[in-house]
Amino acid sequence: MQSHSFCVTIHPMGKTVELYYESAYITEFDANVLECREREDGKFEAVLDKTAFFPEQGGQTPDFGVLITQDNEEFTVSYTGIGKTSDGAGDEIYHVIDKSIEAGACVHGRIDWEHRFSNMQQHTGEHIFSGIVNSKFGYDNVGFHLSDTEVTMDYNGALSTEDIKEIEKSVNEAIWKNIKVVASFPSEDELKYIPYRSKKELSGAIRIVNIEGYDSCACCAPHVERTGEIGFLKVVSVRNYKGGVRVNILCGKRALEFLTLGHEILSGLAADFTTSFDKVSSSVSRLKDENAALKAELYAEREKLLKYELSEIDKDLKNVFLFKSADTDMNIMRKTVNMLAEEHAGFCGMFAGNDSDGYRYIIASGKDGGDARTVAQLLREKFGAKGGGSDLMVQGSIAGVSLDDISECCNNL
Ligand SMILES: [Zn+2]
């Protein structure tokens, strides 16, 4: 870490020395403000003669932190990016701050190290993972995304669950070997003899990040110095994606937080079932089976009850409508309405729901064969009901209408 002394040297305009290439562990630095310009959103962009703030690039989130002037005025850096220079001639790194800072001012910069180190852990973990996928399966990492909540890699080939388990194990072995991570800028001649992974054709100065025995990759991002600092890597999910797979990983503290959450949930479930961790899964299966059996029993009981209810209705009654609670099963509704329609003339129907959430309905034409769609049409005109069907049966839903209004409408059919 650098000492808290302010600089006086001024570098050429539009040229920022990238301190993270000297060391990924520079968390504080002194610099001069070369330019500060207002943005359309009212914030400001400051360009410095040197910076340890890594800008957003290559699918990775930028560094955040603060710039402090000699008068101890603090400027929060909410974003670091790469943009065109004022004259449009080249690219430069800018720091987004919420108020204006004077050009020529000396500032002390401090990056949010916890955030940066987490990004370094994830990124180096990704390199090892992609290096192993490349050497064992021959697939390329064709997409990489490192946000503050997730890390995803896209590979242009399929990986089975067993493959993923094996790769995850190999990555963690590489982490525990505590291998040195070496970044270098080889000359064009040297590059010809170095095999390395790259997502695109590169030109200009190329930075190679090498993890002996596992990976060699063109990359501009800060990395941990030794693989052991990653802690461990956990694959969180894998899904098919564009003919290949998208793998979600977490490293270090993020992996620990993920597993801690999973452990808490599992512990809670184990306590609820008064069982041990390894038996939670079978307890859940048993509960699901019991639930299915109870549902079937409930269904049968409700059917019996309805049959009894229907037997009590006078057979000569025309236009029979029943109103039931929201949890009434659609199959039971259909069955009941069919049974009613066989016995009664006019229209027979059932509404299930309540005034606040609305109602589902099924209506059938009775034994004298009216067109059920006329009732659906009436409900649509009167209450804005949705739905449709055939002349024999219609179904749909109604919202924002009281049971009394629906009942009155049905009674006047
Ligand atoms: Zn990289």
Image (spheres, rainbow, N blue to C red):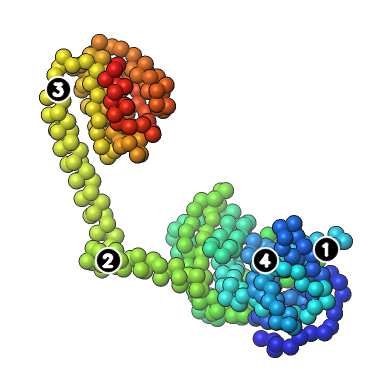
Give the residue number, with chain letter if any, for mark 1. 85
Q: Disc 1 versus disc 3: distance between alpha carbons?
A: 84 Å
Closest to the camera, between mark 2 and mark 4, is 4
Closer to us: 79 or 188: 79
Q: Amino acid at mark 1?
A: Thr
Q: CA distance from mark 3 to mark 2?
A: 50 Å
Sequence-first disc among 3 and 2: 2
- Residue under the image location 33 percent in, 32 percent down: 402
Q: Which residue is labeled 3 in the image?
A: 313
**Residue 73: assigned label:** none
Q: Earlier in the sequence, mark 1 or mark 4?
A: 4
Q: Which residue is mark 2?
A: 270
Q: Position of residue 307 (x, y in %)?
A: 15, 28
- Residue 145 visible to the viewer: yes
User: Are discs 1 and 4 less than 8 Å apart at CB?
Assistant: no
Q: Is residue 114 above or below residue 361?
A: below
- In this view of the protein, which residue sits in the foreground, 174 or 297? 297
